[in-house]
Image (tube, rainbow, N blue to C red):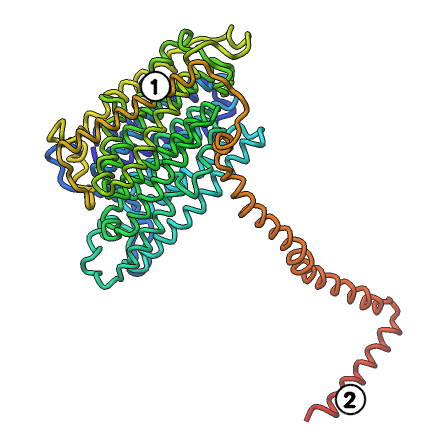
Amino acid sequence: MSQVVYLIPLFPLIGFLINGIFWNKMPKSVGGAIGTLAILASFIISLGIFFEVRSAAFHGPVIVNMFDFISSGNLNIPFAFQLDALSSLFLLIITGVGSLIHLYSTSYMHEDEGMVRYFAYLNLFVFSMLLLVLGANYLVMFIGWEGVGLCSYLLIGFWFKKRDYTNAAKKAFVMNRIGDLGFLVGMMLVIYYYGTLGYQELFSTLGGANAAVPSSVHSWIALCFFIGATGKSAQIPLYTWLPDAMAGPTPVSALIHAATMVTAGIYMIARSNALYNLTPGVLHVIAFIGLATAILAATIAIRQYDIKKVLAYSTVSQLGFMFLALGVGAYTTAVFHVMTHAFFKALLFLGSGSVIHAMGGEQDIRKMGGLGKHMPVTRTTFLIGCLAISGFPGLSGFFSKDEILANTFAHSSVLYIFGLLAAMMTAFYMFRLYFLTFSGTFRGTEEQHHHLHESPAAMTIPLMVLALLSVVGGYVGMPAVISHHNAFASFLGPVVKNFGVHHLAESTEWILMTLSVVVSVMMIGVAWSVNKKPQFAESTGFAKLLENKWYVDELYDAVITRPLNALSEFMDKYAERRGIDAVVNGVGKSVRWGSDRLRLLQSGQVGSYIFIMVIGMVILFTISFFWVR
């Protein structure tokens, strides 16, 4: 199967080309079928490769060279794919969850006139994401990295006739470029000091033959890569683009901003684990930023009323948990949470899309309520997603979040306390969302109430599949107190080497697990008691601060955007118009002024021309006589 790995990104690329070229002529149903089948074909091949990698006959990473990409002097960078446990796992997540979201989109977007164009963008995104995780070197990864950034811009601003949506797309594009610059600088440092961008060549020489490379260089490279990860994976301070990205269609939020694109930073750091194991100081920075992001986003989610905004800040918070795991050296745990999060967060986003579909586009949860009896499948699957993300025992999120908190406790009890606080808030805001949406009485208009209905099968089937995965997905990584064989960690073990992870006593693990469950159940109870008879008075004080997202956007606007705009206006008025333009235009005006005078010599009278010729000859003779020796 490894020899046909090129087919995995090729199928989405073909789907993009067909839908992209014929988008204005092709029937919408045909475009949806082509886009969905392309991803499904990639999933089938990815499944075969996964089982091949998992088999006992598979030994080490397999590098598949497509062609020579860059060859200059001693620098040789092939366009190559790498197959190992980490890449094969991400292939399954991307194509598996992607197939379900494509199927969901065939119904969700069927009334949109740009549906075929939408599927072209979606296929291009999947193609880029597959390049990102398949690349055998940082350059191929960077091509996919930039590709998903472009597709994010196209899909967030898909409904480009609305100005706010195009502004959100530009915001995402610009903030991602800030992080991408850090990634690019890190790549330049790798080339300068190691002369390669290939994973195998770089990681085999770290601390070995190139031990003369100062350790500070490793730290700078790791820090630059982390800056790239903060942009793509929405960490402080580059997180504000992701909540605004909810302007795109809801399936886009499920695929790009929950299951795949925003996890690219986690993938990149997990892939570079050999580098980060040499830089414990950078790991401390990652842990601190991740924890701060998890707490900040969770506090904001508590007071949001847009159903997608709550899930958006939840995504930012969960990404913070993943970076916390990376920061304490538990790379496999972070990847484990990537997988479980892909299941339950895609489920929650698609569930919110089902609600929005039934509500005729309404996203304000204050105008919902009592939807459970009208939408039983959506309600049940959404409940499973809420339980999973809250860490309810037996569901996927329980195993991955418990593992993150256990590793954090082993690293630092202070970090653990704040991590537990973020987990408590997660349970509260998710069940606040659930109760306000599905319980109580309906608070919308009579027309909305009349049109309430369950979504069609093309939307509910993906919900049910994702709900099943949210239930069983965590059993591949059970903790040591339950099972002595962690299949997930064993699978990733040959590729991802954890750093400084300490094993806890069984009694300590049971106490931590019990405490996590108890506080989550308590917060679910608090959410129910607070929201069983909701009152939506105008927020004041601290609640208003949270509702306005700590005014971080306003802070960025005052500190960065407005000064840059003022500087731009100044440079435009004085440096550009009165400086550069004045010089350029002055040259033109001078030439024109001189030409206007010189043309007066062209009178058309032969006598004048003879007179001027004689004068010229006299001048030449004079110069020759007095100056030329």
Give the crowd class for mark 1: few <14, some 14-19, many >=20 residues within 10 Å. some
Q: Quadrant of residue 528?
A: top left
**Residue 622: x %, y % from top left:** 78, 88
Left or right of 40, for residue 563? right
Give the crowd class for mark 2: few <14, some 14-19, many >=20 residues within 10 Å. few
Left or right of 344, for residue 507? left
- Residue pictured at 56% horizontal, 45% vertical: 558
- Residue pictured at 64% horizontal, 51% vertical: 569
Q: Earlier in the sequence, mark 2 or mark 1?
A: 1
- Residue pictured at 89% horizontal, 74% vertical: 607
Residue where numbered disc 2 is placed:
622
Q: Quadrant of residue 471?
A: top left
Left or right of 375, for residue 473? left
How far apart are labels 2 and 1 at the CA level?
Answer: 108 Å
Quadrant housing the N terminus: top left
Residue where numbered disc 1 is placed:
525
Q: Furthest-bottom residue in view?
A: 629
Q: Along the line of sight, which residue is nearer the eye, 563 or 8? A: 563
Q: Quadrant of residue 424?
A: top left
